[in-house]
Amino acid sequence: MVPFEFARGETISLALDAVEGGVAGVTSVTAKLKVVGPGGSVVSSGLGTAFEVSARAAAGEDPGGWTLTIGAAQSAALKPGLYRADARMEIGSGVVITDAISLRIIEPVSGS
């Protein structure tokens, strides 16, 4: 899994597309970013960094969904390294957790 790369101190913005049924049946979406522990397969314990989640309406070929954002100030507090993120969606009486994605936070040349 090739990680998405973001510089520490920049806004992190990801799109989570509604694949089936649109956004109407989803009652709650939360998403977190956690640092990857030694060995690369175990995500560290702890609360992680929460994404701000905003709904995105369908338009043209865009199926709609959600935009997941970590602001520049929160990003500046992250240490360079490998992270994983996923989202938790409540749909009716069930819960779906997305596949995790990898992100690499790098130290920017221009500073943060």
Image: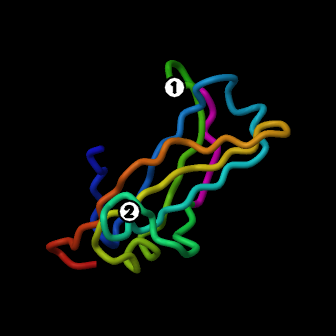
Would you name the residue on which mark 2 appears? 83
Stretch in magenta: 52-58
Dot 1, crowdedness within 10 Å: few (<14), some or many (≥20)?
Answer: few
For the N terminus, give its image quadrant: top left
Secondary structure state at the residue bearing disc 1: loop
Left or right: residue 88 compared with residue 38: right
Residue 31: horizontal and vertical position, in percent?
A: 58, 56
- Is residue 54 part of the magenta span, yes or no? yes
Give the mark, 2 or 1, whose residue is nearer the N terminus: 1
Residue at 38% over, 62% down: 83
Q: CA distance from mark 2 to mark 1?
A: 27 Å
Would you name the residue on which mark 1 appears? 62
- Rendered view: 34 above or below 101: below
Residue at 31% over, 71% down: 8
Q: Main secondary structure of the magenta part?
A: strand
Q: Identity of the amino acid at label 2?
A: Tyr
Secondary structure state at the residue bearing disc 2: strand
Label 2 vs label 1, nearer the camera: 2
Q: Identity of the amino acid at label 1?
A: Asp
Left or right: residue 27 compared with residue 106: right
Left or right: residue 110 compared with residue 72: left
Residue 2: horizontal and vertical position, in percent?
A: 26, 46
